Image (tube, helix red, strand yellow):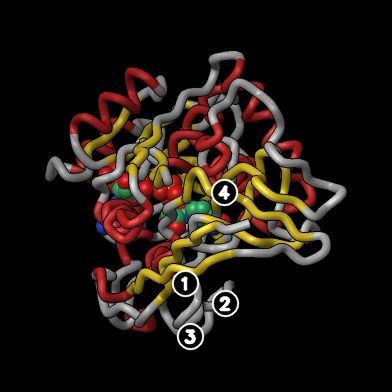
Amino acid sequence: MQYKNSQLLLAKRPKGMPEDDCWKMNHEMITSLDDNEILIQVKYLSIDPYMRGRMNDGSSYAEPAKIGEPMTGETVGIVVETNSDSYAIGDKVCAHKGWQTFIKVKDNDPTLYKIPETKIPLSTYLGTVGMPGRTAYFGLNRVGNPKSGETVVVSAASGAVGSVVGQLAKSYGCYVVGIAGGPDKCSYVKDTLNFDECIDYKAGNLEEDLKNACKNGIDVYFENVGGPVTRAIAPLLNKDARVPICGFISQYNAEDVSKMETPFHVLGVLDPKPEHRFFVVTEWMSEWAKATGEISKLILDKKLFYRETITKGFENAPQALRDVLTGRNFGKQVIEI
Ligand SMILES: NC(=O)c1ccc[n+]([C@@H]2O[C@H](COP(=O)([O-])OP(=O)(O)OC[C@H]3O[C@@H](n4cnc5c(N)ncnc54)[C@H](OP(=O)(O)O)[C@@H]3O)[C@@H](O)[C@H]2O)c1
């Protein structure tokens, strides 16, 4: 066997926005498999906001990506060679083995799993029925605890996580307001995803627009962005409000992470203080299959919609990450290889 694997290795840690010199392209030949190994030809690479955090050194809930190793990331692909009894050639799989075009991996790797045969496209297993969809499901249900009739607000509403949060909350009978950047994203959130309202935080009238949209205050704010959006949300939170803190992307490029304002600084000083905590989707790993099953059914029944930005070409992964960090993506960002 002879397979040319291309890898994007982390070359240096960024200051601010990660430029191209943070990565180095490397090529290697894969010529053999050991016992119980499979070779995956990658079809899609996921590009996610969390990747920016992994490029930093220092303590976090997850290990930093290592210099000289493939940049961290999840992929979907097809098994093209196998030395395993558990995987056959042609199997579709997900693996979390970094930015590379072929993946040689042991069949018992904890990040490896088979993708079921459904009508859902392969790329969607990195988005709505993948990690971001599960993040929305558990963050909303286990931390947000929305009840019918309550007002739920979600930021980055057109994105991979936010789009699922709002549509699930609508299906639970909530009044749902999205926040997104620009008129196109806001129209999509209202007209296609069927949120009750969507506010363009770039239009320059955020506080007033939010107040008008949330006449009964806010019961659940699903936090994806931080910064000025969180400050505008804070005065509208009702007593007993819940704020699942999923992420705060507006701060990810801060040069000094220890000095940045997080949602905890904004929410922690409020009186009454809303229930708020950071969560990670891996807290509910044992229930992932249940969440994936429920979300898949909603998609197949045409009750849940989503959008993907599919960029062709492995070499475009760094630009795609910058696009996610600046809002140039529209829906889940993936790279087609
Ligand atoms: N805790 C967990 O386990 C977990 C798991 C997955 C994701 N997350 C977090 O969930 C959030 C959403 O992730 P996603 O994968 O669904 O990404 P996404 O929403 O598909 O893409 C990121 C979006 O963030 C918005 N954005 C970028 N820069 C911004 C800024 N400076 N200010 C405000 N908004 C900005 C942009 O939307 P607009 O154009 O609308 O601004 C952009 O499209 C992120 O914070 C991510 O870190 C957490």
Q: Give the CA separation, mark 2 to mark 3.
A: 8 Å
Q: Which mark is residue 58?
A: 3
Kind of residue sitting beneath label 4: Gln
Residue at 34% over, 27% down: 189
SS for tag 1?
helix
Q: Earlier in the sequence, mark 2 or mark 1?
A: 1
Q: Which mark is residue 54?
A: 1
Depicted 295 relative to depicted 153: above or below: above
Relative placement, left or right, of 205 versus 140 is: left
Residue at 30% over, 44% down: 329
Instruction: Identify the image quadrant of residue 25.
Output: bottom left
Depicted 329 relative to depicted 71: above or below: above
Q: Give the CA separation, mark 3 to mark 1.
A: 9 Å
Q: Which residue is mark 2?
A: 63
CB within 8 Å, label 4 to label 1: no
CB within 8 Å, label 4 to label 3: no
Instruction: Identify the image quadrant of residue 310.
Output: top left
Q: Earlier in the sequence, mark 2 or mark 3?
A: 3
Seen from the viewer's position, the closer of residues 284 and 106 is: 106
Kind of residue sitting beneath label 3: Gly
Q: Position of residue 154 (x, y in %)?
A: 42, 41
CB within 8 Å, label 2 to label 3: no
Seen from the viewer's position, the closer of residues 320 and 177 is: 320
Kind of residue sitting beneath label 2: Glu
